[in-house]
Every structure is written in structure tokens, then in C-alpha cells.
Amino acid sequence: MKRILLPAGGAVLATGLLAAGLVGSASANANPDWATDTMAKDAPSAVETANFWLEANGTTNNLAKATSYTTETIKASKLNTSGGYTPDGKPGVVAPIGEEKKSTSVVKNVNLPKSIGKVFFVDSKNQLKWCSATSIQSKYRNLVSTAAHCVYDDKANAQVMDHWVFVPGYYQGKTPWGIYVGKTAYVHYDFSVYNDRDRDYAFVTVYNGIQVGGGTNKVVTKSEYDKYTGKKTTDQKVIEKAEFDAGVLKYGADGPYKSAPLDPKVETIAKPADVNGGNIGKYADSDGYKGVKVTGVEVVKSTYDAAPKHSYENNAQSPYLSDSKPVAISLEDYNAFKVLKADGKYLGELAEVKDHKGNVIGWTKQQFFVRKWIKSTELTKYWVETYIVQDGFIKDTGRLGDNVGGQGFTWNQKAGQTVYVFGYPEAAHPDGNKAFTGVTPKWCYGKTLATKYVSAADKVEEHVGLKCSMTSGSDGAPWLVKYSSAKRLGYVNGATSLFGDTNNDGRIDVSTSAYFDGETAAVYNKAAAVWSGSIVK
């Protein structure tokens, strides 16, 4: 049993540590075994958390958008082996709960337990993440077992994860038994304060599960619509002006009949017959004249030259906006216009001015404009609104343990225990190979190794190891001893913490867990006796 002591002269408290207490025979001067943090403090907070995950953006909710806590190719922990484990007392057990019936048949396939699922949370980088977890037996059937690093963010001064929920039986955004919002997290004091991975386990009390339904649409009045705080929308039907005028007359300006100006319709027309030198100035004004406006349009030289060449009585009859003459420009401008002309962004002509000897002495540009007569028609859209609210619901699905059962719990077990590990691996192996999707749960089976696993970089001195190829995403996966595939029940005796590549071939081949001893039992016992209740009024 490893024990980290407080430094002499004072205590060190982590930012995320809100409360701690003594258990067993610990003295007042010793470190407590457990630390606790509040997650969703009350029913409104819990409902907000559930809505955060279940609210759909298009056809996908946030549950389906989350990725495993480590989705990039993971770096295997450098693991070394050491002597054996040191129990700190006698073995202990807490029996599982569940509704599976006993079976005398021989089960050849491994049946996945109903209790397993994913915990979802928002990490310190504001990313949507998940780990693996299981329902575990407790007094009020409201407890989840997972890894502490899936509850406390060690990159943010051990702050508890935000919007933390558990979804048993999760599959592609679906919550078959409801979504269970975390109420209070319990971890070992040494993990909360020192991020000690030898204590990488957590027990979280959850509120009763809930399902959030879309309900039905209901047409309401404008005042009811304005007061409604849930989901709502308006339906619009385009109408003619006569119907709009009648609606405004009946319901007033604040009624459901609406109008809005649209961009005017602009079309090219022939030159009006009455245009002359005396009134063309009116057509050239910014607003035009009689709905008609004359403007200048730049064209290429050939279009300009193609305009009629006969004499005009006055300038108003001319198709030309103005006489086109070469204009002197600098060499810098000349080169800039050449680039624009090559891109089709300048329609005029460019020329070099030469002396009698052929030397370039200047540069000119020449643009060509013709008149264009346009008519602008003001457009207005008219519509009538229907006000719709979504009469949704929140349904209490009951206690976690009543719905999916709860695995048992055991501690101070000897080495060489046969365990099943159930998790949702997703991340690629260190060599980049991606063998798992994280969509469906996978499992490993075998005997825990007799030697301890040590990793200085991860502050690990006494982890339990198991030959297993599951990658990250299975963080927090339960290690179940005495697992009955017929009953789908066993005893939690570990939670996946680290992943190792022991033969250096670029593939994960070992999972490790903290050793569950009497101090683990103290943390569990503290959490297992706490009530949470319903969040549905």
C-alpha cells in the first residue's frame, strides 16, 4: 500500500477539492482517504446538462459528436514490472444487483453486461469527450464506477469535468435506459491533490435517469408565443397585398400579418421616347425619373464602335455617355492595368506613346462607355405567420440500478485473478493502426499479472496489469472478477487507467488499473451511501 504524505509545515489542497473526510481509523493528522466534488448541484443544473447532450443540431446530438478522451494515436506508457501487491487488509466484497435470472446452461459466448456504457463530459479544452464506465451496486442504486481521470481533469488543476453524464447501453446517440446526470464525484484524496495514478478510480452518484422527448407542435397566439420559454418556431405563408391589407385592418400592426421590402427588380429597357437635352439630367439623378434611370456601362471598344454613327441633334440622343479619349497614365499604372486586362477586369485599351524615332515616351489608357437605361420596380413581400410551440417533456426513467442492475465490488484480492474488461476503445495504436471505432463495446479476458506495473512518468508504482489490446476510449472500463456471462454480473475490481506496449512493436498489448485495496473501499463506501433522487418535478 502506497501512501503520499503532506509536506511538513502545512497542507496542500488542489483547486478542485471541495471537501474531504476521515474514514476508518485514520487520525485527525492523517490524509483522508476520499475527496468529493459537486457536479450538477440541483435539478435545474441537471436538466440543463441533459439538454446540452440531447439537443440536436440538425440530426446529430452532442452525444454523437463526442470522441474518446484520447482520439489521436496514443503514446504507450513506459511500463516496468516490480514485486507483488500489498493488500492493506482482508479481502471484502459487495454483492451485485440485477434482474438477470440464473441459468444452468453452459454459456459459450460472452454476453455483454447491461450495466456498461459511456460517461460523457466537456474537458478543459471545451471538447466533447467520453470514457467507459459501469453501474455499480450502492444503497440507493445510483452509483457509477470509472477512472478518476475521466472525472477530474488533471490538465486543469484537478477540476471536475463539466456536463458529466452516464449513458448505459449507449449506441450512436441513443439512450435506451435514459441519461444519468452526475451529482457528486468521489475520488481518492491523493488523486484529487497529487494526480496520483495509483488512485485512478472514481465513484459518481447520479440522479435518476431522464428521457427528453420532442412532444407535439401546438399553435398558439402571439402573446403566448412570446411568453413561451421552450422550443418554438413560426410558419410563414406568402400572401397577396389585398389579403395583407385585410389582415392588418382586422388584427392591427402587431398581428400575424407582416410585410418587408425586397431588393427592387431591375431590368434593362429601351430609351424612353421623351428623352431630350432638357430632361436627361433628371434621368441621370441618383433616384432616376419616372422609375427610369440612365447609367453608364463600360464596354469594350468593338461594342462602342458598333453604336450608330449618324449625327445626333443633341447629346441626349447619343448612345455614348461621353466622348472616349486616351488619357495619359504612368508606367506603374500602365503595368497594373495590363494585369487587370489579362484577368478580364479592365475593358479599355492601353497604348504606348512613341516619338518619331520609335522610342516610348509615355503611356495611355482609353475607356469606352455607353448609356444604359434601366427601370427599377419596388417589391414588397407579404406573409401571415403561424406561431408554434413544441410541447416537449422530460420523463423520469428511474434509478440506474433498477434499470440496468449494478456490478458488485471487491477489494484486497490476490494476484492472478481472472477478469473480464468491458470498454469502448477508439484511439489508434501507437503505430497508427486503428483497430477500433468506439461505437460498440469490446472485451478482454485473462488473469491479472502477478507483478506490479510501474511508470515514473505517470506517477504509478503499483498498478495491476492485464494482457489486452484495447486502446484509449476504454479508459475507466470496469475489471470484473467472478463474471457470470449468464447473469451478466460480476465484481468490479479495477478500472482501466493506462495502456502499454511491452514488446515495442507499436501496438498496445497491456491495460493497467489501480490496485483496489481498503482505501478504495473507503472511497466506495462514502459514495455508496449517498442519495441523489429525481430531477423531474
Image (tube, grey):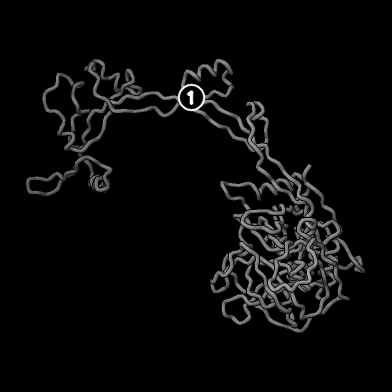
Write down the residue under mark 1: 239
Quadrant location of the N terminus? bottom right
What residue type is disc 1 on?
Ile
Which of 24 and 531 lies nearest the eye of the viewer?
Answer: 531
User: Residue 499, position in %: x, y?
Assistant: 65, 73
| Side of 448 relative to 352 (left or right) | right
Is 204 placed above or below 286 here? below
| Residue at figure coordinates x 16%, y 30% from the top left | 307
Residue furthest to the bottom: 83
Q: Which residue is drawn at 64% across and 71% down?
A: 470
Position in image of residue 285 (x %, y %): 32, 22
List x then y, in percent, for residue 398.
Answer: 78, 51
Q: In this view, does 199 lie above or below 228?
A: below
Q: In which quarter of the image is residue 405?
A: bottom right
Would you say residue 33 is visible in this rendering? no
Residue 347: image quadrant is top left
Instruction: Say which of 295 and 91 sits in front.
Output: 91
In this view, the residue farthest toward the front is 105
Task: Residue 122 in the image: state x and y as whole percent.
Answer: 66, 55
Q: Residue at x 86, y 59 (%)?
A: 139
Residue 85 vertical position relative to residue 19 in the rendered view, above or below: below
Helix, strand, or loop for circle 1? loop
* Nearest to the observer: residue 293 or residue 499: 499
Q: Which residue lies furthest to the left in this view?
A: 356
Q: Specify whether residue 296 is in view.
A: yes
- Closer-to-camera residue (64/68): 64
